[in-house]
């Protein structure tokens, strides 16, 4: 039996072909701390000509035996912590700015489009502390790519630039913390050759964005093993929380 259970109707083929982020563009590069401090959200920046903007980042594969995670990881830290992102799309910039004041209640009762349910078993140790209702993580800069909210024992994972609700999970308190046994995701985003990828993303978002642990994020199996491709994916998907990446 498939681990995916349909929640709502048939696939909307037209929606599958149109991504909400198609019109989102970002430029990225290094800046001095003084220049960075002067920037406002949504500013468009120029980082010199292409040759000046070319920077070689110290990003390398680290074998499982040489890191505490005990899996082969790609070190993205220098790239993740030095890059900045802005948008030339005023609608995206305005949406990002306006949503900084949102408490996320508008997502209550909503699910990702074309939602399917994935049954999982994810446990999180918070030493018995429970997450309070409301925002559990809010992006303060455009280098942080997610807003996460909790209401009525549910978690909502939202892209901070677009406001898209990407993941929805339950939240079950446990003596040590909480667990998640249901994830809802847009089924058009599921790769049948890599069916567990989405649950790995949710697990990473909770560990990194909610609990603050610097753990590796997953890389899609279809993504080419090339330094620039991995770095660009890591930053666009996870921003400055994408410190390490792994195919495992």
Image (cartoon, helix red, strand yellow):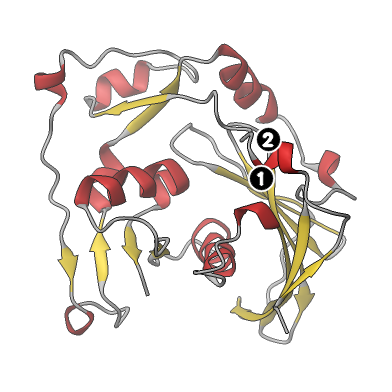
Coordinates of residue 242 in the picture (x, y in percent): 38, 53
Instruction: Tell whether 38 sits left or right of 111.
Output: left
Residue at which label 2 appears: 163
Q: Tag 2's secondary structure?
A: loop
Residue at which label 1 appears: 158
Classify 36 as above or below 194: above
The quadrant of the rendering that contains the N terminus is bottom right
The quadrant of the rendering that contains the C terminus is bottom left
Q: Tag 1's secondary structure?
A: strand
First in sequence: mark 2 or mark 1? 1
Classify 46 as above or below 151: above
Disc 2 and disc 1 in contact, CB within 8 angstroms: yes
Q: Residue at x 76, y 63 (%)?
A: 116
On the image, which quarter does residue 8 sit in?
Answer: bottom right
Instruction: Tell whether 42 sits left or right of 55.
Output: right
Q: Residues within 10 Å of mark 1 (few under 14, many from 20)?
A: many
Q: CA distance from mark 2 to mark 1?
A: 6 Å
Between residue 244 and residue 229, name the one nearer to us. Answer: 229
Between residue 31 and residue 170, name the one nearer to us. Answer: 170
Coordinates of residue 71 in the picture (x, y in percent): 30, 79
On the image, which quarter does residue 83 sit in?
Answer: top left
Q: Residue at x 10, y 20 (%)?
A: 52
Coordinates of residue 212 in the picture (x, y in percent): 49, 61
Q: Which mark is residue 125?
A: none
């Amino acid at each position: 039996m498939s681990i995916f259970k349909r929640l709502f109707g048939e696939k909307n083929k037209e929606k599958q072909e149109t991504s909400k982020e198609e019109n989102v563009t970002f430029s990225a590069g290094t800046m001095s701390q003084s220049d960075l401090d002067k920037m406002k959200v949504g500013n468009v920046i120029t980082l010199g000509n292409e040759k000046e903007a070319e920077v070689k980042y110290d990003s390398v594969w680290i074998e499982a035996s040489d890191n505490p995670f005990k899996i082969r990881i790609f070190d993205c830290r220098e790239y993740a912590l030095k890059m900045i992102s802005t948008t030339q799309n005023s609608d995206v910039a305005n949406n990002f700015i306006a949503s900084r004041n949102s408490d996320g209640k508008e997502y209550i009762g909503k699910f990702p489009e074309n939602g399917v349910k994935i049954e999982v078993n994810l446990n999180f140790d918070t030493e018995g502390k429970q997450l309070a209702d409301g925002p559990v993580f809010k992006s303060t800069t455009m280098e942080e790519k997610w807003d996460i909210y909790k209401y009525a024992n549910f978690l909502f994972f939202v892209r901070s630039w677009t406001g898209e609700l990407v993941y929805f999970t339950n939240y079950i308190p446990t003596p040590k913390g909480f667990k998640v046994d249901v994830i809802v995701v847009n089924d058009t985003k599921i790769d049948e050759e890599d069916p567990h990828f989405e649950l790995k993303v949710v697990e990473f978002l909770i560990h990194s964005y909610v609990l603050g642990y610097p753990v590796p994020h997953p890389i899609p199996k279809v993504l080419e093993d090339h330094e620039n491709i991995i770095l660009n994916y890591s930053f666009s998907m996870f921003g400055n929380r994408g410190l390490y990446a792994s195919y495992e």
